[in-house]
Structures are given as C-alpha cells and as structure tokens.
Image: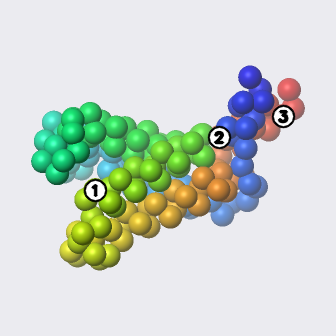
Amino acid sequence: MNTLIAKLTESTSGIDTLPLRVGAGIVFAAHGAQKLFGWFGGYGLEGTGAWMASIGLNPGELMAALAGGAEFFGGLALIVGLLVRPAALVLAVTMLVAIFAVHIGNGLFMSNNGYEFGLALFVISAALVVRGAGSISADQFIHNRVQVS
C-alpha cells in the first residue's frame, strides 16, 4: 500500500508548480461550482445538463456532473496539492472534451467562444501531470511520510 501511495504522491521538487496549481485550481473549482451548484452565475446541474444535451453530450446531466465534478474537486485538489498528477490528468481530458466538443469550430480566440482558454488550462494541466505538485503540497508531505515509514 505504501508503494502505491508513494507512486501517486511522487513529485518533482520545486516551487514552480505552486502558482500554476493554485491559479488553475481556483479557476477549475469556480467553473465546477457553476456547473454543479449554480454558484458564480452558473446554471447548476440541471441547466448545464440541458445545455450539454443540446450540443449532443448525452445524457446531459451525467455529463454535467462528470465535468463539474472533475473541475470542482480537481480544482480543490490542485489548490492543496493533493493527488495532483491524477487530478491534473482528469482535468486535461476534461479540457480536451471541452475544446473539441464545444470550442474548436469557433477558432482560437475567446471573443468568438474559441478554444484559447481551454487550451491554456489543458497545457497547465498537462504540465502538472508531468511535474507533479512540487515541494509545497500535500503530496510532498505525504510522500515524505510514506518514504520514511
């Protein structure tokens, strides 16, 4: 069990990932809260699910729950630095779905509902999959404790 925990919490040392984790984590958690709870001007699960169904992502409420859950809980995980690699992988996949299912046909720029914002979040998530949480994180704390045991 310790080997699995050590592998899941393994990270490259450094503080370079801290601003990426916290900044992207806040954005992801807020977007997830819009989808799940209707916070911050969002439509909640029912409204987001209806919209997702209208663009062909069915069943809409399930897709909204999956996307919202990935964003909300994944964002929280990034903020505290817990299980960052798996959380970032789920978030990267979520961003790829958003890019190709919603934004790709509108070009790059956000002013046209393009994919630039999704691409930026995808790139940050992909970088966190590669680097891990960094030195100032719950992952690093857990990893160090498991390695000592």
Q: Nearer the viewer, mark 2 or mark 3?
A: 3
Element under label 2? Answer: helix
| Among numbered discs 1 and 3, the one appearing first in the sequence | 1
Question: Residue 147 — which label?
Answer: 3
Q: Quadrant of the N terminus?
A: top right
Identity of the residue drawn at 86% across and 26% down: 149
Across and down, in percent, residue 42 comes to: 20, 48
Which quarter of the figure has residue 53?
top left
**How much space separates mark 1 and mark 3, taking CA atoms?**
42 Å
- Front: mark 1 or 3: 1
| Sooner in the amino-acid sequence: mark 1 or mark 2 | 1
Residue that label 2 marks? 138
* Image coordinates for residue 30, horizontal then vertical, percent: 34, 49
Residue at which label 1 appears: 101
> Real-space Cα distance between discs 2 and 3?
14 Å
Mark 3 Cα-neighbour bin, 10 Å: few <14, some 14–19, many ≥20: few
Q: Position of residue 65 (x, y in %)?
A: 29, 36
Q: Is residue 3 above or below residue 32?
A: above
Type of the residue with mark 2? Ala
Residue drawn 27% across the image and 64% down it = 103
Question: Is residue 74 among the parts visible in the rendering?
Answer: yes
User: Circle 1 — which element?
Assistant: helix
* Disc 2 to disc 3: CB gap under 8 Å: no
Bin the neighbour count of mark 1 within 10 Å (Cα to Cα): few under 14, some 14-19, many 20 and up: some
